[in-house]
Image (tube, grey):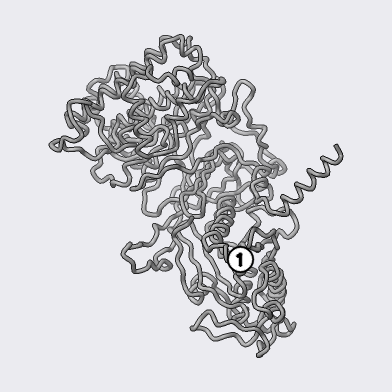
Amino acid sequence: MNDNVSTCAFEVFFESHLPSSEIALDAVIGELKKQKMLVSRGRSLHQTPSSSTHKSSFSHTFKSFKTLFRSGNAKPSRVMKTLQSVGNAVRKALGRIENREVNSCAIRLEDDVESTAHGCITSNLEDPLHATDVVAPIMGIDSSNVHFSSTQIDFILFSRVAQIMNKDARRRSCFAVTFKDSNVSLWWFTRSLTVKSTPFDMIEHADLLIRVFVFLFGSQKHLLGYDPLVTLLPDRNYVYEVPFDGHAGPLYYRTINLICDSEPAFVSGRRLRVWEVQQVESVSNPVRIPGTPRRVLKDVILDAGVRTEADIQGELFADIAKLAQDESWASRPLLNDFPKRDLDVLADALEGDEFKRYFSCIIAKHVGDADEVTGHFHPPTSPTGDTPPRPKRRCFFIYEHVCTALNNISTLGEAVDALKQTLIPLRLMFLAGWVHRDISPGNILVYREERGSPWTVKLSDLEHARRFPDPETPVEDRVTGTPYFIAYEVLDAQELLPSKAVSYEDLSYEFLPIVHNYQHDLESIFWILLWLISMRVNETLPRVFGKMYFQQRVDSNYAALRYRALTHSLFCHLELMKSLPQPLRCCTFFNHLDSLRDDLHLQYVARNRDKMCDDLASYSWMVSHGINAFFDAVEAIRSEWAHVELMVDWESRSAFTPHPPQESDAQVASPPPSQHQNVASSNKRRAADTGEEGRAHKRARPSPVRIPAIVPRRCGPVTRSMARSEGRITRSTTRRLQEEAKRKQRRL
């Protein structure tokens, strides 16, 4: 649950988050009095103690409240219906004010959930409700249910708000209203924190309730939590505006397919959407600009204090360009053991900007402003020393090409070719003094200009790349990467040492903190290869080994498993042998993979024993001959294993990216492809269909505390029908389904 909750007095909440025109408010109150909706409170009305000592009670209240709260507590569903009537009256009164715009929203009642009544502010009053239709949720709490804890209540509300903000790409924040009897609390949710007001009594302070409705019915969308740079189209696609950044813009991109969707369980946390997009004329005319290729747009919420991927890419490219200007670059210590063929490949890549073709390049960006948190968060004066949450900001990045990820390549031969070509951008990074720190199938992309042309590997997601050696790397940022493929030393924060030469109890040995180095990136390639042959072969095979050694964990027990896999021969794992397809059992591919494992282990031990982790020359053999030995050996027997089929997460939509045909206005308005259009063909079984996919989900986030599990990432397109099916299953829905089942049974 979102722990960053700040509570403030309702007077402060109104002043900070609900700006209103006193003229409009007075006019609405006057109109409601004329309509006799507002009446004098009098002495006969049931009264409760004022929730605030700072604001005197209002002279009038709503007429309907006199009977609603006469007996004390009222059922939340009755209060919700009354609020619906009050809201309609306020909306009509607001509409009678001259030169005052009123949006199309009203209060819609929803099904009750347990001891809570639900409604929302929305313009969709009749059709099935989608998360993108909800402006603000309203929830009523049954005070008579003493067994319903505040934690359970908050869970229901937070889950509802998370659904709204996670399913609607326009949302930057969200308001919510809760009530318990006559006490009303207001909420404001952002990706950085949640602000809750102290309750006010809607009987005593009817003017405050009116002010809430005037704000919700009379405000522009950006004040209600919507990002003005993102527009929802009628077909539920979006148009993103990338403002002028000094080089180009504004640019407009219409979404076509959702490539990756990673959402936090609640509102706070990292939110990531990756879209396939096409450039269009404008928001009002979302027609493709002729001749423009399809692009990739990443929409991500980041901590405001961290460098963005665009910043890191710029620094990395500047360092590689500087390297190219050094006439003596080939004599650098890291290249001591490099054969001439590898030096020639690097020389070609360093010609001009040729090196950029090996990276997924950002060609446009927008970095939003940070959320304001210091003015809202008031930590308690306790020994725990609570501090305000780190503010977050929203960023858009536009990438040059639509590519295919390694986990969507359908044969082992092509996958190994891609991994071999990955060595080129990795070596360029190493030579420029950088490490990637998140080598995974999702970050190894392949691209080609046209069908039949050779693949080009593009290394992506430089968000966590750092210089090496980098003494400024913070301790909490030393564990990062995708758990399936994190190097053992990084995972366990311990050096690999000779088993007998140095005892861990030997206090004379100085253990150094683990800093991600060149070999850690290479080790990730080993884990990817092992994952491909043990978890991704498109056959019905045992997956016991893969399920044990590839998990979404970063704890010490998991590290112990990985230690065994890295330091012991792969032939010792009988379950691994059972998971191999017949072609890999009958050739020496597996032997060469075990030799790669052994080389990695021995190189770690030798380097750590001699305390040479900062000696760049100590990595030269492993980065060249060591890794080359595997790829050269398996290439010699390619015909025996390259045809092995792999499962894919989604069949590639854009293995190559030709210029799309000219589209008419009608085509632009058409809905995105349905899910069945992206299902793999019969010889390309989707991993998600088998239940044995072992798919690597999102990366582990740097944290000083080891977490037991990581929220999985959902990849692939999300169609409108899929989104509609994600609504809550309410009691009334359950009863309706049960009745339909009984009727069908009777007919049988």
Q: Position of residue 237 (x, y in %)?
A: 63, 46
Residue at (85% x, 41% y) in the render: 746
Location of residue 566 with respect to 464 vertically, above or below? above
Is residue 140 left or right of 526 when viewed as pictured? right
Q: Pick whichever, 314 or 370, lies toward us.
A: 370
The quarter in which the C terminus is drawn is: top right
Q: Position of residue 467 (x, y in %)?
A: 29, 39
In the image as oriented, which residue stretches furthest toward the front? 147
Q: Quadrant of residue 20?
A: bottom right
Q: Can residue 227 be seen in the rendering of this structure?
A: no
Question: Label 1: how many residues lie within 10 Å, few (<14), some (14-19) or many (20+)?
Answer: few
Residue at (67% x, 69% y) in the render: 75
Number of on-image labels: 1
Q: Position of residue 551 (x, y in %)?
A: 44, 34
Residue at (64% x, 59% y) in the render: 114
Q: Pick whichever, 634 or 103, lies toward us.
A: 634
Q: Quadrant of residue 57?
A: bottom right
Is residue 303 left or right of 164 when viewed as pictured? left
Q: Can residue 545 be seen in the rendering of this structure?
A: yes
Q: Position of residue 707 (x, y in %)?
A: 40, 45
In the image as oriented, which residue stretches furthest toward the right? 747
Location of residue 237 with respect to 53 vertically, above or below? above
The three-letter code of the residue at mark 1 reads Asn
In the image as oriented, which residue stretches furthest toward the bottom? 43
Is residue 253 left or right of 440 when viewed as pictured? right
Q: Pick whichever, 719 or 434, lies toward us.
A: 719
Disc 1: which residue: 145
Q: Is disc 1 placed on a helix, strand or loop?
A: loop
